[in-house]
Amino acid sequence: MNHYTDVLKKYAVFSGRARRQEYWMFTLFQVAVVIVLAIVDAVIGANSIIVGLYLLGTLVPTLALTVRRLHDLGKSGAWYFIVLVPFVGGIWLLVLTATAGQPQPNQYGPDPKVLAA
């Protein structure tokens, strides 16, 4: 839960770097919440309105976290648009977000692992 609140504290911060752990714990929490909300939607017959509102409400922090995760790899946030490439774009972004970040400081800031220690 700590990673989720950390991301929400940086709601619209697109600068800096994000560790793999921060990114994937937030993603895991997002998936769990969406599953629960989808069940609630199905039970009350809301036609995915609750899930849609939740995803809309977390769109900015999700984008910001992804951009910071790409910064940890030394890549521009513009790499996010790789998802627009059919078939392989989403897979490539998945590979990038799962890749270890640069251990040394880069143009986006110091190593977040060192800051967290």
Image (cartoon, rainbow, N blue to C red):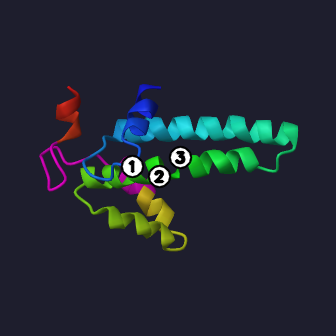
Q: Position of residue 52 (x, y in %)?
A: 68, 51
- Label 2 vs 1, first from the N-terminus: 1
Query: Label 3 crowding class (10 Å Cα cut-off): few <14, some 14-19, many 20+?
Result: some
Q: Mark 2 and 1 residues: CB-CB less than 8 Å, in contact?
A: yes
Part of the protein shown in magenta = 94-110
Q: Amino acid at mark 3?
A: Thr
State the SS at label 2.
helix
Q: Position of residue 12 (x, y in %)?
A: 39, 49
Q: Which residue is mark 3?
A: 58
Q: Residue at x 37, y 36 (%)?
A: 21
Asked which quadrant contains residue 92, the reply is bottom left
47 in relation to 31, above or below: below
Q: Which residue is mark 2?
A: 60
- Label 1 vs 3, first from the N-terminus: 1
Q: Residue at x 76, y 49 (%)?
A: 48
Quadrant the C terminus occupies: top left
Q: Mark 2 and 3 residues: CB-CB less than 8 Å, in contact?
A: yes
**Distance between the alpha carbons at the discs numbered 2 and 1:** 6 Å
Q: Which residue is mark 1?
A: 12
